[in-house]
Image: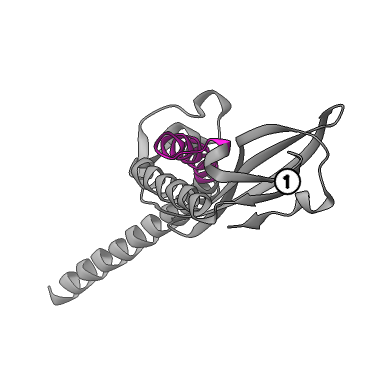
Amino acid sequence: MRRYRSRKKGRIVFGAVCLALGFATVFLLLDARVRPLVRRLTAVQAQTLAAQATGRGVSAALERCETDYDALVELQRGSSGAVVSVQTDAYAVNRVRIAVDQAVTNVLAQLAQKPLGVPLGSLTGLALLNGRGPRLPVLISVTGSVQTDFENRFESAGANQTRHQIFMNTTLTVLTVFPGGDTKTTYAATVLLAETVIVGAVPNAYAQWSQK
């Protein structure tokens, strides 16, 4: 009787071990298939989030900031009326930079709250089922860093005329962390902030991006 119980107990233990090994094998196979898929989907989502956050953030910030040419730049003229120097208002420029960086960061934080889901059909490897079926939720963490700088461009606008353009370059780097890995995506956007056409001879010192 004791031998029978001992054998029965041994079978139960053996069955439990086999079942555990089976679950572990299935888990490892699913993980091996899911992880590359999650990495690809996360990279795509990160690029989308970066583009949306940059576009919406820049638009929202510029609506609140004064970005007319006269608000950012002061042209100094001589007695003859010719431009002798160009000075930028560092305070006004920095105010725009801070507003853009904060707005983009806030929009990214709002968009990043949407969970990422992996379609179960994509795990089969079959083209017909790719992207279909219920989604397997995946926990991800999204963080971003924003850098905004400004660029001057000077070009001829006709006889004795020069066009001065101020461009704002905003770069958003998004780091997305998911179980078993992470992805980093960088998105850059350039916006024409202000411009004017200056008539008259322009001295060599004109090209200096000076600050008040």
Secondary structure beneath dot 1 equals loop
Vertically, is 143 above or below 68? Answer: below
Image mark count: 1
Neighbours of disc 1 within 10 Å: few (<14), some (14-19), many (20+): few
Residue at point 37%, 55% (across, down):
23
**Where does residue 147 sit, x and y in percent of width and height?**
55, 54
Residue at point 12%, 73% (across, down):
1
Work out which residue is located at the far top of the displayed protein and give it: 128
> What's drawn in magenta, residue-wise?
41-69
Pick the front one: 201 or 142: 201
Query: Dominant secondary structure of the magenta stretch?
Result: helix
Location of mark 1 (residue): 78
Residue at point 58%, 37% (across, down):
69
Residue type highlighted by circle 1: Gly
Work out which residue is located at the far right of the displayed protein and give it: 159
**Where does residue 135 sit, x and y in percent of width and height?**
37, 35
Quarter of the image with the C terminus is bottom right
**Where does residue 113 sit, x and y in percent of width and height?**
33, 44
Pick the front one: 165 or 125: 165
